[in-house]
């Protein structure tokens, strides 16, 4: 489907699930796609998450209503898939919020394009009826911080309150009047899947003058319980440990 190639939503994040299937996010190629694309995208999983066997067979659409997810991970406590999602541009500096979402069953719809992020309606679909089955995000992030990679923490190096929570990378805004982001966030996750307050875990890549010294992209855990953070403009990978 070459005509659906995306200029700026090109990331295809992949994870192997507890079921040994391959899960892939498919960002759609618009800021907000037009109504005539709705049926095609729902059928193919563009603007959603698909899954398949690792040999490429049995491809199916796992979730829809996703604008552009560039981070996902399975909760080791119960195998549920969680993912970040980037919000609609051009609606102002402070809306709509970025998202972390939780999938509890196959076939759920996460609100895009009716919502641009959180409960903020898009201008393009403001007069259309929102489907009844839309699932809201479990976390709303500051607008336009560009929430990317995320990882559940299972290690023992950090204090106990970090166990089972989510480390997520904010790449930083590209067109906000005052830049935000460029940091690693932490979200505590409870056994029932509810979340605590999201806080900044590592920052300092964004100066007071609004200049980026680095822009975190992804987070992953090492066997010793420390975490790695990638930074694409710096071409660096940082290791964060606890003593």
Image (spheres, rainbow, N blue to C red):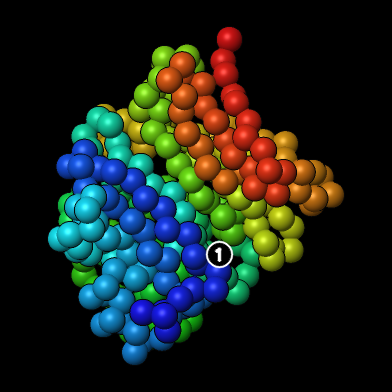
In this rendering, position of residue 94 left or right of residue 2: right
Q: Mark 1 points at which residue?
A: 95
Work out whether residue 92 or residue 76 is closer to the camera in this orientation and state it. 76
The residue lying at 33 percent from left, 46 percent from top is 15
Label 1: few (<14), some or many (≥20) within 10 Å? many
Work out whether residue 133 or residue 44 is closer to the camera in this orientation and state it. 44
> Mark 1 falls on what kind of element?
loop
Location of residue 46 by image quarter: bottom left
Q: Position of residue 197 (x, y in %)?
A: 46, 36
Q: Position of residue 4 (x, y in %)?
A: 41, 79
In this rendering, position of residue 230 left or right of residue 155: right
Task: Residue lying at the far bottom in this picture: please name it.
Answer: 36
The N terminus sits in image quarter = bottom left
Location of residue 91 by image quarter: bottom right
The residue lying at 79 percent from left, 51 percent from top is 210
With respect to residue 233, does 204 lie above or below?
Answer: above
Work out whether residue 120 or residue 26 is closer to the camera in this orientation and state it. 26
With respect to residue 30, does 100 lie above or below?
Answer: above
The C terminus sits in image quarter = top right
With respect to residue 209, does 122 lie above or below?
Answer: below
The residue lying at 48 percent from left, 59 percent from top is 11
Q: Where is residue 114 in the image (x, y as percent from the top left)?
A: 37, 74
Inspect this view and state whether residue 215 appears: no
The residue lying at 64 percent from left, 52 percent from top is 172
Q: Position of residue 93 (x, y in %)?
A: 64, 64
In this rendering, position of residue 56 left or right of residue 232: left
């Amino acid at each position: 489907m070459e005509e659906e190639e995306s200029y700026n939503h090109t990331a295809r994040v992949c994870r192997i699930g507890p079921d040994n299937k391959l899960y892939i996010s498919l960002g759609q190629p618009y800021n907000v796609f037009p109504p005539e694309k709705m049926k095609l995208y729902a059928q193919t999983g563009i603007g959603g998450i698909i899954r398949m066997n690792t040999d490429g067979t049995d491809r199916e659409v796992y979730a829809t209503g996703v604008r552009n997810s560039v981070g996902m991970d399975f909760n080791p406590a119960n195998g549920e898939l969680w993912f970040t999602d980037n919000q609609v541009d051009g609606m102002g500096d402070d809306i709509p919020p970025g998202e972390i979402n939780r999938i509890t069953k196959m076939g759920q719809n996460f609100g895009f394009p009716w919502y641009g992020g959180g409960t903020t309606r898009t201008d393009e679909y403001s007069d259309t009826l929102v489907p009844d089955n839309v699932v809201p995000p479990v976390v709303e992030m500051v607008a336009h911080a560009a929430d990317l990679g995320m990882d559940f923490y299972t290690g023992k190096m950090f204090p106990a309150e970090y166990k089972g929570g989510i480390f997520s990378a904010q790449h930083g805004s590209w067109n906000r009047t005052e830049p935000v982001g460029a940091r690693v966030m932490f979200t505590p996750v409870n056994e029932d899947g509810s979340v605590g307050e999201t806080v900044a875990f590592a920052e300092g890549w964004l100066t007071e003058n609004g200049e980026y010294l680095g822009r975190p992209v992804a987070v992953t855990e090492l066997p010793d319980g420390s975490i790695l953070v990638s930074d694409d403009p710096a071409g660096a990978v940082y290791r964060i440990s606890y003593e």
